[in-house]
Image (cartoon, rainbow, N blue to C red):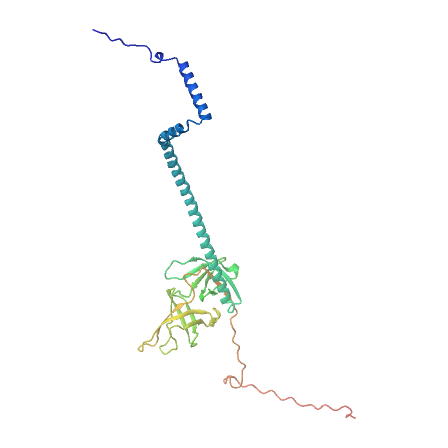
Amino acid sequence: MVELTHDTRPIIGRGPPLGATFLTLAIAAIALMVADQRYDQLTRVRAWLSAAVYPVQVVVDLPFRAWDWVSGSFADRSRLRQENLELTARLRLSNLQLQRFAALEDENRRLRDMRENSAGVADRVLVASILNVDLDPFRHRVVLDKGAVDGVFKGQAVLDADGIFGQVAQVHAKTAEVILISDAEHAIPVQSNRSGLRTIAVGTGDSERLSLPFVTVEADLKQGDLLLSTGMGGVFPPGYPIAEVTQVVRNASTTFALVDARPTARLDRDREVLLVWFDPPVAEEPPATAETAPTDAPPTEAAPAPTATATPAPGAEE
């Protein structure tokens, strides 16, 4: 029986020495480089090898490209998100600035209108801002930021750009409470701009409605008439708009008509109002005549006629 023996010598030791192998490869590499440099004979081989190795290069480089694309996508997304947040914040800030500019422009327009409208009815005006509004639905009152130190007095007229707003009810050092013309406890004399009819407008507790309870069914008043202040009592300047008649209902069985009017002032929307000072017109009393003299006055005694004294001419006395 043949017995197989196993060769336990190392494989490396079976071939040529490592130094000879390295030297052979180095000589071959140098020879190939010289041949490629001088004779250009390995161009086709190099091109074929490049084409053969290209798929391997693509496969090896694919994970790195994928990683760069993913990391770049996340970076771009984070950058775009940050830019979006910054642009959104700038847009909101710009909108706030535009709203503020619009509010300032509207405020300037209202103040200009108030100045122009009150120029002919008041000797002095003072712009006041509304600090507080009474939350009681049955009390239409506001608090202004002007008081006694500014010359405000009780009963003073308060206007806005469109009409009479109310009058001062209470005065404090630096604030004043104003009762609106729509308050149920307020009444104001009015006159129709068309017919000259005078009557009383009473607040109803509704900022959009005044009542005229003392207009008879025969009175010359109709829908659309503008009601102006009469100036009676010296509280409100004469000729300033108060309300516009919105409803006139006449019933033959009643004495008075049902008349409603809408205030021209923006009672529930104003933020600035005008405190006005004016000199009410003083009616001149006509001079007393024989016809207008009272008949029950005691008779007056006639004064004695002066006696005439003759003055002698010069040289007459002897």
Q: Residue furthest left?
A: 1
Q: Nearer the viewer, residue 1 or 117?
A: 1
Residue 275 seen: no
Q: Give the number of callouts.
A: 0
Percent position of residue 211, x then y: 37, 69
Q: Is residue 257 left or right of residue 193?
A: left
Camera-nearest residue between 102 and 119: 102
Q: Residue at horizontal 43%, vertical 49%?
A: 91
Residue 224's quadrant in the figure?
A: bottom left
Q: Which residue is located at x 51 percent, y 60 percent? A: 148
Q: Is residue 115 visible?
A: yes
Q: Residue 268 at x, y = what percent? A: 40, 61
x and y percent of residue 163 in the render?
45, 67
Q: Which of the two residues, 158 or 291, is positioned nearer the viewer here?
A: 158
Residue 95 in the image: state x and y as whole percent: 44, 52
Which residue reaches farthest top? 1
**Placement of 75 over or under 283, stated as above or below:** above
In the displayed structure, 132 sits above or below 227; it is above
In which quadrant will I find the C terminus? bottom right
Depth check: 151 or 270 in front? 270
